[in-house]
Amino acid sequence: MAKKHKRNHWLQRHTRDAYVRKAQADGYRSRAVYKLIEIDQRDRLLRPGLTVVELGAAPGSWSQYARERIGPGGTLIAVDVEEMMPIAGVTRVRGDIADVAVKQRIIEHLGGRGRADLVISDMAPNITGIRALDQSRALVLVEDSLTVATAVLAPGGRLLVKLFEGEEVSGFRRRCALYFKRCVIRKPAASRAKSREMYLVANGFVGDTGGKAVVRGAKP
Ligand SMILES: C[S@@+](CC[C@H](N)C(=O)[O-])C[C@H]1O[C@@H](n2cnc3c(N)ncnc32)[C@H](O)[C@@H]1O
């Protein structure tokens, strides 16, 4: 009964939400797109011709927008553990990002070389309601995003990653600063006010794999 009440409450809030209605009118698969649009307008992340790796892509609104922005000359590899309906010009990889084989498939799609311009991650765990557990699972996804970014980005590359407010954020930010010249936090208006989510934009990747991507734990 409590579950049913919760679901009805979610449905009511969802249908009242202006961003949900706007996404439907604009032909996007999710309201999440307006978070990316706002950050992109501010930080100029996407432009024609870029090579982009997207983590946690389903149902696909970020992919739809990123595809429009990078144009036919760009490359977009979209990863999710869930099935995502196809989008023209988007290469989909289905699997858990923690899986070394999934990381290897991303690198194969990049032609075996770490030469992406941008990694974007909107990954989020299924929320259990147990705060400590949710926080630690979210942090694992954030760390996985950084692992992928450091394996595939070209020097000067950028990372956009979703974080959840908590004690670990400052530690993660410090770790990002080891690999990137500048890291800033963004809280887009389309993030629900009650949500603890925020985004980190890391600019100027300084690591250099010599063009060769490396995945820790992978068989040579
Ligand atoms: C908030 S949704 C992303 C919405 C997307 N940005 C959009 O605009 O449609 C988060 C996604 O992260 C994915 N995800 C969570 N954990 C993952 C993992 N370990 N590996 C790959 N994807 C994961 C979920 O399946 C979910 O589809």
Image (spheres, rainbow, N blue to C red):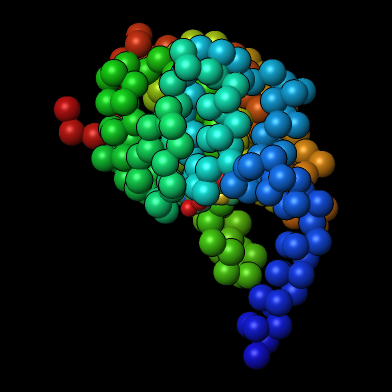
In the image, taking residue 218 as reference, residue 93 lies left or right, namely: right
At horizontal 63% and vertical 82% (from top left) the residue drawn is: 3
Nearer to the camera, 5 or 132: 5
Report how many numbered discs are placed on residues in the image: 0
Quadrant of the rendered structure where residue 27 is?
A: top right
Q: Residue at x 60, y 15 (%)?
A: 47
Up/down of 125 relative to 111, above or below: below
- Compare residues 125 and 131 and report the one nearer the observer: 125
In this view, the residue in front, 178 or 118, is 118
Instruction: Give 152 or 131, whichever is nearer the viewer.
Output: 152
Residue 197, position in %: x, y?
70, 48
- Return the residue found at the far bottom: 1
Does any portion of residue 135 appear in the rendered image?
yes
Residue 163 vertical position relative to residue 45 in the rendered view, above or below:
below
Residue at the spot 59% in from the left edge and 47% down from the top edge: 29
x, y percent for residue 152: 41, 23
Outermost residue, left direction?
220
Please name the residue shown 28% across and 32% down the image.
104
